[in-house]
Image (spheres, rainbow, N blue to C red):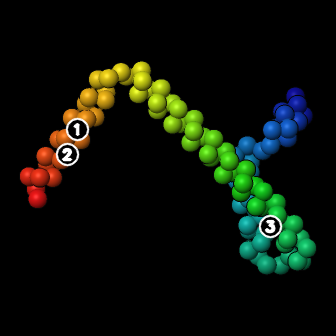
Amino acid sequence: MSKTKTKAQTEKGPSFEQALARLEKIVEKLDDGNLPLDESIALFKEGTALAKVCRDKLAEAEVQVEEALKSAGAAAGDDAEESDAEDELGDEDDVDEEG
């Protein structure tokens, strides 16, 4: 069964955690400075591709979080919006009293 999972992961790419772990290993190897130039270039290219995978997955996660927050806000209704507005007004009053 693990072969099936590996095949599925390969088709849609590595997970964020897998890409990050591999990227960290590449950085360690490149930092050593003991690699031939050709190998360093190959690792650098792989690293830049993995960095893109990580950025894309983080952007995807950010969109999902924003959608979840919007859904939660919509589910809470107008009461939440009114209390937020009151909090903002209350904060401004506090600033005026201090200043």
Q: Amino acid at mark 2?
A: Asp
The residue beneath circle 1 is 87
Q: Secondary structure at mark 3?
A: helix
Q: Is residue 78 visible?
A: yes
Q: Amino acid at mark 3?
A: Phe
Whole-percent x and y of residue 83?
25, 30
Whole-percent x and y of residue 27?
73, 67
Question: Which mark identifies residue 3?
Answer: none
The residue beneath circle 3 is 44
Numbered disc total:
3
| Closer to us: 38 or 21 | 38
Q: Is residue 53 above or below residue 78?
A: below
Q: Secondary structure at mark 2?
A: helix
Relative to 97, 49 lies left or right: right
The residue beneath circle 2 is 91
Label 2, label 3: how many angstroms apart (C-alpha)? 50 Å
Quarter where residue 6 is shown: top right
Whole-percent x and y of residue 31?
73, 74
Q: Amino acid at mark 1?
A: Asp
